[in-house]
Image: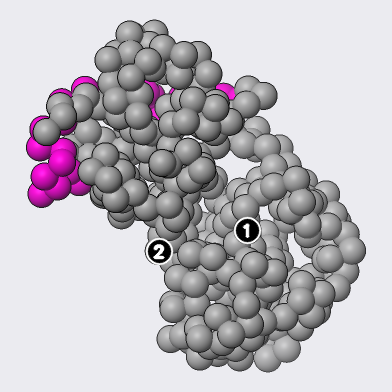
Amino acid sequence: MNKFKALIISDRFFLPRIFEEAVEGLSFWSSVKRRYLEVAWPDADFQRTECICEYIPYPEETLSLVAECEILVTQMGAVDARLLEHAHNLRVVGCLRSGPVNVDVAECTKRRIPLFCVAHRSGPAVAEFTLGLMIAARRGIAYEQSTHRKGRWNQCDYFHFQNSPLILSQERVGLVGFGKVARALVELLRAFRCEIWACDPAVEEQEMRKHGVKKRTLQELLSGCDIVSLHVRLTPSTRGMIGKKEIACMKKEALLINTARGGLVDEKALAHALEEGRIAGAALDTLEDEPWSGVHPLAELPNVVLTPHIAGAAQATAQTGAHEVARLISEYCTGFPSRDSCVNPEVIR
């Protein structure tokens, strides 16, 4: 058996012990010599270049260490052209993220190095958090927690019948995008017996029907749902997909939930609509510019719940990512690669 060397760029969420637990029991990894380097995420802020974004720079010693390795594993550490130039023996890269934006995919492909990632690693965590935001926003939990601490008792505001909110079983939930997170959310929403619509041009109506979900166009979903939740990737075509025109289609009683990417929403248009009462509220885990300074038109609005991009922050996220990357690399190196989890499957021979 060939002896492989692996460099694992860990951080303070993806710990070395998490990866060691992941490789335990996988025979391939028993003969792999592993070296760990840590980057300071989440205590260090993300950086961006023209080719990669949301990355943490690697220490200089990474360049000499990667030169000896056939395997590279990372979560938030940068994998850029400079690093790959030094990686003379590199055969495979594994990234624990669902979207490997910190990896120069074009450069990996040019060098015919397959890149594996974990599309579903944070699905259960984000789905739970999304459900929490729906309830917190609709039932006034977040707002009233802050006002209650300031000595205000607003009970009577909620017990006027016309002000009382609906419960989830009375609402229609619309999911924009029907990937792993949306499907995990559907499973949770089953307990609430609410009607669920979804729009996703990449998913057939029959597939949605299997999950008890009705397929609709974006226009139909926006105008017909009480809660609209976003579950799509940020691309040039989806940037700003929820703007002034789309918000105008929504019900006056509707909530907008975003646990995907801030760039999907025109935040100025949303703030204006919320100020004027054209929709009931919003709950956002992510904003266009992160980290934010605390000054934002949405931050002062009582009908907005804001959280600092923490929907995926669960131990299971790191554990699932580590287990999946360990398995995918093991399969690739033993001749049984999974093309579905490979970002650039065309390089797999």
Q: Where is residue 256 drawn, in percent x and y?
A: 69, 66
Residue 199 occupies quadrant: bottom right
| Residue at the spot 62% in from the left edge and 26% down from the top edge | 51
Q: Where is residue 204 drawn, in percent x and y?
A: 62, 77
| Residue at the spot 45% in from the left edge and 70% down from the top edge | 184
Q: Is residue 309 magenta?
A: no
Image height of 57 relative to 256, above or below: above
Q: Secondary structure at mark 1?
A: loop
Q: Secondary structure at mark 2?
A: helix
Tag 2: amino acid = Pro
Which numbered disc covers residue 124? 2
Instruction: Classify residue 255 as left or right of residue 83.
Output: right
Instruction: Classify residue 174 as left or right of residue 63.
Output: right
Badge 1 density bin: few <14, some 14–19, many ≥20, Cα 10 Å: many
Q: Where is residue 237 drawn, in percent x and y?
A: 77, 51
Residue 295 occupies quadrant: top right
For residue 113, say whether it is visible: yes
Tag 1: amino acid = Val
- Label 2–label 1 contact, CB within 8 A: no
Badge 2 density bin: few <14, some 14–19, many ≥20, Cα 10 Å: many
Q: Out of 347 and 233, give the one closest to the viewer.
A: 347
For residue 46, say whether it is visible: no
Image height of 38 relative to 116, above or below: above
- What are the residue bounds of the magenta stretch? 21-48
Which numbered disc covers residue 232? 1
Q: In terms of sequence position, does the residue under pointer 2 or pointer 1 come before the other? A: 2
